[in-house]
Image (cartoon, rainbow, N blue to C red):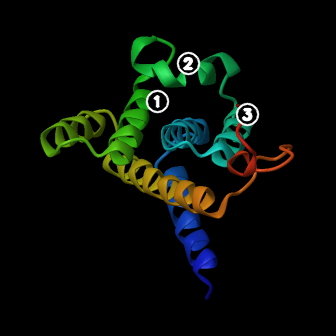
Amino acid sequence: MRLGAQLGAVREVVATTARENEVPLGVVEQMNLRISQLNGCAFCVHVHHRRALRAGVPAEQLAQLPVWRETPRFNAVERAALLVGETITLLPEPSIRDRDLLAALAVLSEGAFAAIEWSAILINTYNRLSIASHHPVPGAKRPLSHQQEQP
């Protein structure tokens, strides 16, 4: 089995676990979008913004993702997922990491927490693959990294 297919198989298990634990697709897609923003993956930002909209997340809410801690727009499950996503992505020092993950676990069931945690790990993996592979943003004329800088 090729590596990409194996990663896809892991993705399917994680998606199934999320569904079985009643984690809404919109929650996962918001977290995927936020992580992609943090990692600077333009391709994945494009993909997960569109998927979040299709999952029913309002555009106004997606616009607030970078400041999710400062707005009441996000519910407790969304906040827990975003906290897990940022913690897994940024890997703060252990005491902060433990505090944040325990705070999320206080809101989520163990199964939902596991699905969200693995979803965060996967999107970080996909972000790195897309960045390293120079995946172009759909509709872009060419990857930005290949454009010449203007004086």
The furthest residue to the left: 95
Of the numbered discs 2 and 1, the one sitting upstream in the chain is 2
Q: Residue at x 73, y 52 (%)?
A: 146
Of the numbered discs 2 and 3, the one sitting upstream in the chain is 2
Closest to the camera, between mark 2 and mark 1, is: 2
Of the numbered discs in the image, which one, if any, rests on residue 64?
2
Give the quarter of the figure containing the N terminus. Answer: bottom right
Q: Is residue 7 left or right of residue 87?
A: right
Nearer the observer, 38 or 102: 38
Q: Is residue 63 left or right of residue 137?
A: left
Q: Is residue 128 left or right of residue 5?
A: left
Element on which disc 2 rests? loop
- Residue at which label 3 appears: 150
Q: Residue at x 49, y 41 (%)?
A: 35
Crowding near the residue tagged with mark 3, few <14, some 14–19, many ≥20 C-alpha atoms within 10 Å: few
- Label 2–label 3 contact, CB within 8 A: no
Of the numbered discs in the image, which one, if any, rests on residue 128?
none
- Whole-Å distance between the Cαs marked 2 and 1? 12 Å
Depicted 129 relative to depicted 141: above or below: below
- Residue at which label 1 appears: 78
